[in-house]
Amino acid sequence: MPALPKRTLLQRLTGASTVWIGAVLVLLYIAFSIARPDAFPTRFTLQTLLIETSVLLVLSIGMTFVIITSGIDLSVGMVLIFSGVIGSKIMEWLSPGQDATHAGWGIVAVGFLGSIAGGALWGLINGILVAKAKIPPLIVTLGSFGAALGAAQLITGGVDTRTVPEKLRDSLGFGTLFGGIPNLVLVAAVVTLIGAWLLHTTRFGRYTYAIGSSAEAARRSGIGVTRHLVLVYLMAGLLSGLAGFMNLAYFGTTTIGGHTTDNLDAIAGVVIGGTSLFGGTGSVLGTVIGVFIPSVLRKGFVIVGVPVFWQPIAVSVVLVAAVWFDQLRRRSRDRK
């Protein structure tokens, strides 16, 4: 039997679904640019669009790995809040008078590590319960959703922390490099590139696809499925922690009540980008495009003047269409 031709990196990064999803994004951008040529295709609009999407993109990279394994993580938005709370409280506790506004880089660094550790803790809990206790991911992460939010509210008393170091806000929140590229966008870009490398060129990525296609087959082929699933959920938690710190830097507060739909937005972006809810299929490039489609829709609707009530309807239509296309693709593949 002749060996199947080896796919190139470009072929793994792209595919039929990614191409048509990318075409949808380009058409949306062109349509809004034609509708409001004075406001939409501007540097300011592009810059704000990238900044507003950067935190969600970081969440979605972790979600991509989870969904490819045929799992789900409903807790990422609340883990983001919890991680931001941990980071902000650590910086407060280490600052004179518990006012972190003028804290130095050493305190900011410890706060960053606290946020990452807070996210990793929830990711590890999710991974152990899913992989070792064999509890369905939907139930585990739904429980983490409430528990992480409750823990954040207990720590803060339900009141947002607002004493965020000015150095953090000025450097990461509003700082720029390389001729005006926002630092938040650069962080999201680095995370995306690392995620793409990990998923598409390493053994870790191949195992992720294999487990999503058939966990039992992967186990029989010698893959440590339990260990790998724990690592995948741990990574999702780590990235939620990073997103929480980025959110803290941008808004200057923990925004406890502002992330109730982040988990659904991340899932929607990943699925719109061509990652199958059934597992085994997906790409980081598709996720990037999928995350930006709802963002462009929302930004375009605001600029064009479409009532905000239409925004969730439009995003829902795109999401359902993406899932429908995925089902058609699966049926076509199964008939071959």
Image (cartoon, rainbow, N blue to C red):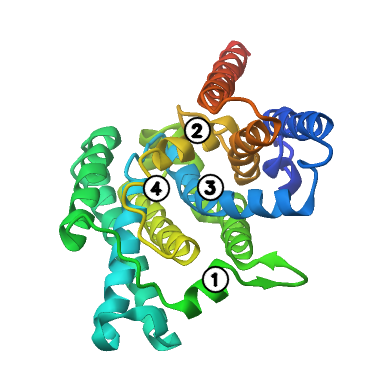
Q: Which residue is mark 4?
A: 222
Distance (Cα) linking label 2 and label 1? 27 Å
Sequence-wise first label, 3 or 2: 3
Q: Nearer the viewer, mark 4 or mark 3?
A: 3
Residue contact between numbered discs 1 and 4, judged by CB atoms under 8 Å: no
- Disc 3 designates what residue? 206
Gap in angstroms between the C-alphas marked 3 and 2:
23 Å
Give the mark toward the camera: 3 or 1.
1
Q: Is residue 120 visible from the viewing direction of this image?
A: no
Callout 1: SS? helix
The residue depicted at 58 percent of the width and 18 percent of the height is: 321
Labelled pair 4, 3 in contact (Cβ < 8 Å): no
Residue 172 bears which disc, if any? 1
Give the residue number, with chain letter if any, for mark 2: 268
Residue depicted at x 45% and y 59%: 247
Indicate left or right for 274 with 127 as reference. Answer: right
Which of the two discs, 1 and 4, sits closer to the camera?
A: 1
Q: Is residue 306 above or below residue 195?
A: above
Foreground residue among 121 and 279: 121
* Discs 4, 2 touching: Cβ within 8 Å: no
Amino acid at dot 3: Arg
Instruction: Give x and y (percent) for residue 52.
Output: 57, 50
Residue 195 found in image quarter? bottom right
Q: Secondary structure at mark 3?
A: helix
Q: Amino acid type of disc 4?
A: Gly
In the image, residue 148 lies at what x, y percent? 24, 51
User: How many circles with numbers are drawn on the protein?
Assistant: 4
SS class of the residue under badge 2? helix
**Quadrant the N terminus occupies:** top right
Q: Earlier in the sequence, mark 3 or mark 1?
A: 1
Residue type at mark 1: give it. Leu
